Every structure is written in C-alpha cells, then in structure tokens.
Amino acid sequence: MKAFINKHEYSFEPGETILQVARRNGIFIPTLCHFAPLGHKPGTCRVCLVEVTDARNEKRTVTSCNTPMEEGMRVDTLSANVRNQQRLQMEMVMADHDQNCIACARHGDCELQDLGMYVGLSSNRFAPELRHARPYDDTMNGMVRDMSKCIRCLRCVEVCRSVQGVAALTVDGTGLGTHIGVGQAPSQNASACIQCGQCTIVCPTGALAERDQNNEVLDLIADPDITTVFSFAPAVRVVLGEEFGLDPGSNVEGRIVAALRRIGGDIILDTDFAADVVIMEEGTELLHRIKEGGKLPMFTSCCPGWINYAEKHCPEAMPFLSTTRSPQAVFGALSKTYLARQMNLDRSRLRVISIMPCTAKKDEAARPQLRTNGVPDIDVVITVREFARLLRRFGLDLRNIEPEPFDNPFMSDSTGAAVIFGTTGGVMEAAVRTVYAVLNGKELEGIDVLPVRGGAAIREAEVDLGEGNGTIKVAICHGLANAQKLVEQAAAGTSPYTFIEVMACPGGCVDGGGTSRIKGQYHPHAEQRQQGLYTIDRAMPRRQSHNNPQIKKLYAEYLTEPNSHLAHELLHTHYNDRSSVQTESILSIKKKLTLTDK
Amino acid sequence: MPQLIYGVWNDTVYDNRGSSAPTAPADLPIELFENFNPGNPVEIFLSHRGFLVFSAESSLIWALWKHHQRLAEESCGRCSPCRSGSQVIARALERAGLGQTVDWDDVRQIAELMHNTSSCGVGRTGTVPLLAALRYFPEELRAVPAGAKGGFYSVTTSPCIEACPSHVNVPRYIDYIRDGHNDLAAGVVLRHYPLAGSCGRVCVKYCEKACRRAQVDTPVDIRDLKRFAADKTIVPGLLHPTVCDVAKNRRVAVIGAGPVGITCAYQLLEMGYPVDIYEAHDRTGGMVRYGIPFYRLPKNVLEQENQLVREMGGIFFFKQKLGRDFHINDLFQRGYQAVFIATGCPLGGYLGMEGEDTSLPDYENGIEFLEKVHDALEAGKTPELEGDVVVVGGGNVAMDCCRSAARMTSGKVHLVYRRTEQDAPADHEEIEEAMKEGVEFHFLTGQDRLVVEDGKVKGLQCVAMRQTEPDESGRRGVKPIPDSAFVIPCDHVIAAIGQKSDPNMLIPEDGIACDKKQCIIVDACQGTSRPGVFAGGDGTTGPRSKGPSVIIHGMAQGALGAQAIASYLETGKEPFIPREQISYVICKSHMLDGDAVCGEEKKERVKIDALPPAERKHNFAEVESCMSQGEAWKEAARCMRCYRILSVITRSPIPGVQA
C-alpha cells in the first residue's frame, strides 16, 4: 500500500500508523506520551499532530501515533498549520506543569523541555492562570511522586502493570486535577507500590523520581567527627560510565574508587565483598533446607523490590524466602561490627553510605529489621543518578579520573561470583559455584553456568550437584509480572524447583530503577551492561565466593562459620506480612465518584 | 410552537432575526423545545450539533459560559487540549459575560484545537456551539444583561448511556477500570441498582448495540467489563453497604424481591425511607433466581447482591404472597404510606394445542421446569431427565429450558420455533451456545398436537411454516404449509412460549386498574390508578413497559418508582426528572444517532474463556469466565468515550436543579 508524507511516496503495511511509517522512513514527528519500547501510546499529549488529506480529499488534523495510514493518504508534517497547532498544544501541556525547572530531579534530562524546543515554543501564556494543586507524596523512602510535574503520559502506569505486574499506580481525578494516584491507599508508601523505581526510568519529566539524598551525603562528608564508609553495588560499576559519556557496560570500578576519595570519602569499600558473604550464608541455608527438609523451593532475598512485593502482594511466599540479608544489608551490619572492630573505630561515629542501582535499596535501608539499637546499619543510600549529580557538584567528570584500586584489607576484595549479582541469573550462578564446591570438596568444572544466563523472563535449569548429590531444578525470574506464577506453585506445593532467583527489575540490578535512564528508551543498554559484568567475572583471579581470602578471614576471625549464631544475628532477617485486603463501604465509594450527571 | 430566532445546527446557519419567513432544521421536531418542564420554555439549547436560540431575552454568552463550565468539569484531564483548553475557554467566557475584554482570536484557536485534536467526544464535540457562535454570530457575544439568567440544566451522555434504560454512565465505569479503580467502577453501577454482577452476566446489553466502536471493529465488551468490576468488588464482599440512616418516617412496602423490587427498595433505603419487602417465595431474586439457570448466573452472585439491601436495613417477609396472604388495603392498614408492586409475571403459559394435558408429568411449562431445576441445584443435587426433550419457543426462556435440558439428559434435545432464527427474540449468543451444546433447532416449525400414549408423552406433532409477505410494519408473519405435519418423537415437552402475571393477586377492593392481560396499568412515573401505589417491571403496562421484559428495563422502572414514591411522599406530586426529559428529547430527535467514526485504529475485542461444550453435560457450572485484570485493562482501552454534552437554558429555574 502506498501513501504520501510531505509529497514523497512511501509504502506501508495495513494497520501501520502514520507515526510508524514516518519513523521508519526517518521523518521526525515530535511525540511525548508515546513510548515505543513498551508499545505504549495512550494518545494523551496530542502533540504528534499531522495534517492528512484522505482519498476523499477531506483534510483534517490527526494524531499520528494512533491514526492508521490509509491508501493514498497525503500526510503533511510541516505545514504552518501543523506547526502552529503543535506549538499551541505544547502550550496546553505546559500550562499546568510546574514551572520550577531548576529544582527538578530531571533537570537537564527532561523530555518535556526537549519537546518545547522541537515545536519552537516561545510563550507560555496560560501557566499563571492554570496553576493547580496536585498531590506531592514524599512518604516513600525510595521515591518522590510530585504530581505538579505530571504530564499524564501514563508511561508509569504501563510499566507498573505490564512489566512489574504490581499495578500500584492508578489514574485519579479529573480536569486539571488529573494525576497518577495509588488507588484508595492513603499514601504511596502504604500502597501496593514496591518502590522498584521502574516508573522513574520511564517518566519523561520529574513527576516520579528518586528521593534525592545528596545533601545528606554532603553533610556527612563535611562533618569532621564522622567517618564515612562508602561502598557501591556490582551493577554500579558497569552503569555509571554512561552518565559521563563512556561506553555502556564499561567497567568504571577504579574510577569510582578514585572519585569517592576525591569527594572526601574516608573508607572506600566494595558491596561485592558482602555479596560473597551472602553466597556463603545463603548457600549454606539452601543446603540445610535440602538436608533437613526445610521449606522449598527457597527464593533469593537480595532484591528489596521483590521482598516488598512478597510482603505486600503475596505473603504466602514469605516462608520460602531465604532469611539471608541482601548484600547491602550484610555490608551495613558488618561495617558497624566487624570493620569497626578490625579498624578500631567507634561505631557511633561510623556512617555507611551505599551507591545503588536501585530506589528500593533506599527503602530497604530504612527497614526496622535492619537496625541495631534503633540505629540503621546503612545510613544513606543514593542511586546511580544521584551519584552522578553528586560528582558533578564536585566538578568531577568520570572520564578525567584515573582509576585507583581498593586498599582496605577487610571488606574490599571480591570474586567473579559477587560481581554477577548485578544481573539476572547471577545470584543463582554464584550460589551454584559455591554449593557445588561445598558438597564435593572440589570446584565445579566449566564454571560458567550457562543455562541460568540469558534474557528469557523465566528460565529454568537442572543443576548436577555432583556424584551422590543428585540434581536440583532451579528457576530464574526477572520482572515481577513473572514472579506470581512461581509463588503460586510454591504455595500450592507443586513447584518443581529447589531454588528460585527473583529480581524485581527486568534484567536485574543493571537495569534497576536507580540506574541511568536514556530518554524515550527502556534499558537500551541492558545487554552491554550485563556483558560488562560477565567480562569482569571472567577476568577475576577468583570466581567463587568461598575463595575470597577476605571471606575466609571474616569467618576465621569473627563469624566462625556460615549460619553460626553470630552470623544469624548479623546477617539474617525476617519478613512481615504487609498485605492488606481493602474493603470499603459502598457509601464512601459513591462519595469518591467524580460524576457530573445527577 | 417555539420560534427559532437564530442558531446553527448540523453546520447550517438559521437566522430569523428580522426575517418574515423563519426557518428551522427540517429534521428536528422543534416542538421538543416548547417547554422543558411544564410551563418553563426552552430559551437556548446547545449540543454537539450546534445551538438554537428561542428567546430574544436570553443571553448566548451566559449559555456558552455555563456549557463550557460543564465541559471543564467533564474533562477527564488526560489529553492536553481539553484539560487545559476547557479551563482557558471557560474563564474567558466568564470574563466576556462580565463585560471584560477577551481576545476572541485566542479563544477560537484553542476551541479549534480542542475540537480538532482532543481524544474523545468531550473536547471534540463540546466546542461545537462556541465555534459556531464565533463564526456566524460573533455580534451576539455580548456581556450578560442583568436578569437574563434563567434555568440551566446540562447532561453528559453518549449513545450507550442513552440506550441503557437505567442510563448507567458506561464510559465512566470503563474509565475507572482502565484507570485501576475497579471499586469505583462498581460504584458507578451501584448508583443505579445493586445487581451489578447479575446484570453483568445476563443483560441483553442495549449499550453494546449502540456502541460506536462497531463502526471500527466490534463493540466494546461492556457487559463483561461490568461483570469484571462487580466480581472484583461486590461479589467477594470487598464493597459492603452501610446501614442507611432512617431519615424519613414514612414507611414503604415493596411487593416482590425480584430485581425490580430489590432496586426500588435499594433506592428508597438510600433516600432514608424504611422499607419492608414482601416476597412469595422463601428467597430473594424472583425470576432472576428461578428463571436464569446456574450456568449463566451462579446464585452466590445474586445472593451477595441482594444481601446488600438487607444490610442497608431492608426487612424481608418471605412466603408472603399478594392476594393469598395479604391485600393492598392491609398494607395501608399496617401503616405503610406507599406501596410498590413488583410481582412480575411468575406464571408460564401452555401451548393450547390439541391433545394438551397439563396434568401430565412430562408436559410442563418453562417457568415450572426452570424452577424445578433451580430447586434441585439449590438442594445440592444435579437434576436429571430421561430420554428426549422438545422445547417450544424462541425467547430466552426457551433457550434457558433447552440448554438446561441438554445438561440433564443423555438423550436428544429439540427446539421448535414457528418463526425464523432471525426473528427469534432470544439473544443470538444464547442460540449459538444452545447449538454448541447439541440442541437441534427446528425453525419455521409450529407445534400442532401433543402425542400421548398410555398417559405418557411420546412425541410432538409439528407442521412446517412458511413466511408471509411483510405487512405494513415490515414484519413477516408465518403460515402453516398444508400437509407438512411430522412427529418429533420425545419423552418430554416443555412449553416456553411466554409468561403472564398471576390473576389471583389483585382483588377489586385494591382499586388498581389492570389491562385485559391482568397487567397493572402504570403512568410514565410508574404510578397506578390508586394514589400511593406504584408498580414496575414485568406484569405492568405503561409508557415504559409492555408485559414481560428484561432485567435492565425492570431495574430502571424500580429506580424510577423509588423517585416517584419519594416525590409522592414529600410533595404529593409526580416528580419532574430533568434527566428523563433530556433523554426524551434525545430519543425523539435522534440527536445521538449517526455520528461517523473515522481514523480509529482497530483493537481486537477480548475473548472470554468459556467451558468447552463437551464439559457442560450434567454440569451446571458457570459457562463464561470473568476476564482477567489484564484483559479488562485492554478491553477498557477500546472505549472511545463518545460523550456528548447537551445543555438547556430555560426561562425560569428548573425544579430540583441548581443553576
């Protein structure tokens, strides 16, 4: 089939939209709400206007994102009329948008600003008139929902539903009051939201963003009485480079260490060390459950988004969760005990700051279970995006920083097993490497456990645990929309698996809700980031957690053995049922209806 | 007859200012605009077709301002031109009305943007009157003269809302589902009646027949979306009623706990009236309980929904049959000040043919048969039948009978109907399902004689029919073809040819007029010939009902009856219901018909999972499943929100409406 765009003829398939045909042929039409990676086109912004003349010679203005191309249609994307309408439309979008760009988390990375430039917006006549109060919700530890910045593209709702299966976000209100809400919950913190932060990855403006805690970090650095302990998660080293124009997936571990020293961090450590500890604890826990007939399948517990999901959406999963704390939580607990002892530091003056690819990690740090005498084990968590801003506040550009090595003898060494924690399948692979070695007294041959790698939403593999130990079935799942089925099987007692790894975000931590976002795209560098981790793993001198010399030292000098009494006290946790079935009276529901017909 | 002074309608300009030969839209019954409520003339009317000004004293700018204020309230706020534009325009019109300067060029540009690029009917069609006025009558946009304000009433409706007898705001509840508020979606339906899940299963869905999406692909699955909302909220008990405050001291008796009586009681309880419900059976539900088989409507759904009325404070008296246990006069003596009769048509008819013996156990009418099936299932038994069955009839009762019979017997089930498949009043889907379940259909076949041997039914003698030429109304009759008789051998015959009201319920002392079929005669507000007595649903006849009908009509009458009763108790008068008046104007003017859809993307309608026909034998489990949450979001996104805003300005204020 044939049609014309700006007088040039193009062929198209039936059902293709005007925008699809234009994009395929390199013709630019500005869009805002449209989010191609998720097939999301709610048609709310109405900016992608074009003028069409159909076969009957009728001329009309249409939105190109959701208007099918027709045989013989003539499309004009450039006429003065189109441009004027696009500009006026943009003025309508801007009219009730918060105008305080300088205070916005998305400053410099805003798709709305870009659009204003594309359409040549030169005035904003209606903004003073249409100021309207909409919810500002900072009840969460991980994120802030500022609806004065919402442009109603509904991308967040889409990702929350279709990728995460969480469906915490709703569309509330009418007219200028329309905003993203959280159902009938009193706040987002009390809602079904698990703070995975995937909505902050897709939000084109700063309406949904990470809670910025850089000022807290700066205060700690500036305080002469405080010793700051910095660490960063496996994924951070293959993501942060993107913020400074380095190739996606490139390892900037050494540059981060150097940068942290430059901004005044006192002790620079590695969360990877704690990941190795997690493998020792979790692997031992798994073997114990298998031998003693404990609850199986055992689900991993490293991912705070997944833990929030289990507690809020499917508490029946809780008995199946590993009790081992996450690497971040293990790191916090050991910093204020083991490290303080080894380095002879006063724990009350220690402050642990972690850099995470994750918004839910901020929430994890605030869990009451992860406090000692009311003091949190981890004091501040900042995301990759915040950390990039923090470095800019120091005038630092990662590209110009020479890499430096870790130098702490207690909690900085790590293995290849630890670094792959940052990708889906990585925790499973690391666990298999160590569990096999523990059972057989020798290392697994062919250390790359390839069947657990890959990108499929749910992967399963059979793992041979060595002679006399049989094989176990394991499963790996990422993107919470896929987890529900595995939980249902487990609760029903029909699960064929022994061990299941769940990471809330699609791709795992490398694509977490606190990672770098690329405008209009959804984790376009997932593959490079993942390969970045596998590359580091391959180059590591030691690739199994139990071979980390600092781990051996930790157990020999402090914890005695995995799952010991002290290990339980410091490195394990428990979970609380936070699910709630909301019932409501018909009368109160009727009062909430926005209906104008009486 | 109202005089059109000027206006624009369907893009045609009418200007009779100073004209000696006034013109008016030819296809519009202009007398509809004589009075809105009695004695209150329409001065200006605005809709998606344009605007009409009937009074020189009226103010067009005030009308436009009120209309746009309504539009701004109605804007769902998703799409930018309507969200912001509606506000900018409403504010500009207010300023213009106050005599302040307005840049009309700005207003026109924004109105055009809303009209051309909004995503739904609110912004697209709500701006039509303003654009027409700006283009053709800019000189009439003057400041509002003192005292020019009269009454204002506005309604936002759509083809599906108008098609629904209860005027349920269909796009609104679909929006709520799409937006993640299943509870609010159910709440929209619960404003009208409590039986949301039941109606979501068995409604004949006039709304879907009116759905404009049919022009693009297929209508939105409105009924299943309603069911979805109810199944997620009301049925599992997540939405619960509160005991209603008894604010009023006048007691009302409702006779019949079917959908009509239940809806009337529900509405009256909400208004604060104490309501007692008298029911002949020992359970609630009426014909919806006994007539609709379990495989279409599991009774726990109905039970949960009827329970709402009990929890709101309604008191049920079971095994109390009108005409047997009490009369209307008794109710007034017991202190009730108003009565609503919703006794329905509880009796099945017989065929009235040769050899008919209604005492035969193998020959029964559809209503009795279905009630027996219900009772067995309710007692936890799976009902059985031996041998072959013939069902006679072409309505939904006939389908319920043959589909039930197909579940009960290992033999053959036949359906005999004298007209064609197209003429059958049953839902077409019901016919399809019956066919899937193995029922053999004999269309254009008339029953002739019951074949009985030794007191046992042995068959049904039938004749072939042929269609006659269409009569004046276009309907084709049928005539038997001579010498075409044949016998369908069978062991049971079920007559499912209609229902009638019980002639033994009313006595002359009740003072309630009936027609010759013993149906109670009611007026447009469900009032009977006796003051204080109202009636609705099957078994009544009036402007809104002619004998047995479907649940949604009945529930609409139940709700209307409640309003009429409240008006009678408070003022002694008939209510004026502006919403009904607007619907009357829309219906008579066909104002919502025929708007073309263009440039819409196709989106596939959700496929509802159904029990495979092979698994339906000896199984009364529900056939259709509820759609999943994901399917509901997808289906909800198919709604095009064909909203139209209609506003009327009257000379004086409209009773019960705040201008």
Image: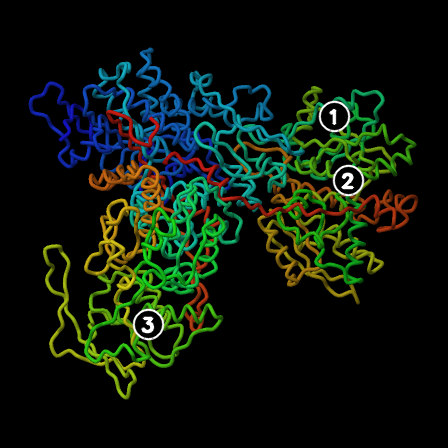
**Residue found at x 60% / y 30%:** A137
| Quarter of the N terminus of chain B within the rendering | top left
Give the side of residue B631 with respect to residue A208, left or right: left
Give the x, y percent position of residue B466: 14, 69
Task: Name the amino acid, label 3.
Answer: Val
The image quarter in which residue B508 lies: bottom left
What element does badge 1 sit on?
Answer: helix
**Residue found at x 14% / y 72%:** B480
Question: Same chain, marks 3 and 2?
Answer: no
The image quarter in which residue B371 lies: bottom left
Give the x, y percent position of residue A404: 79, 30
Relative height, residue B307 to residue B563 (above, below): below
Tell me, yes or no, if residue A255 can be seen here.
Answer: yes
| Quarter of the C terminus of chain B within the rendering | top left
Mark 3 crowd level (few <14, some 14–19, many ≥20, 10 Å Cα): many
In the rendered image, which residue does mark 3 sit on? Answer: B439
In the rendered image, which residue does mark 2 sit on? Answer: A370
What element does badge 2 sit on?
Answer: helix
Spatial separation of the CA atoms under disc 3 and disc 1: 76 Å
Chain to which the residue tagged by mark 1 belongs: A
In the rendered image, which residue does mark 1 sit on? Answer: A217
Task: Name the amino acid, label 1.
Answer: Val
Task: Name the amino acid, label 2.
Answer: Leu
Viewer-proximal residue among B522 and A404? B522
Spatial separation of the CA atoms under disc 3 and disc 2: 66 Å
Give the side of residue B475 with respect to residue A455, left or right: left
Mark 2 crowd level (few <14, some 14–19, many ≥20, 10 Å Cα): many
Give the x, y percent position of residue A249: 65, 37
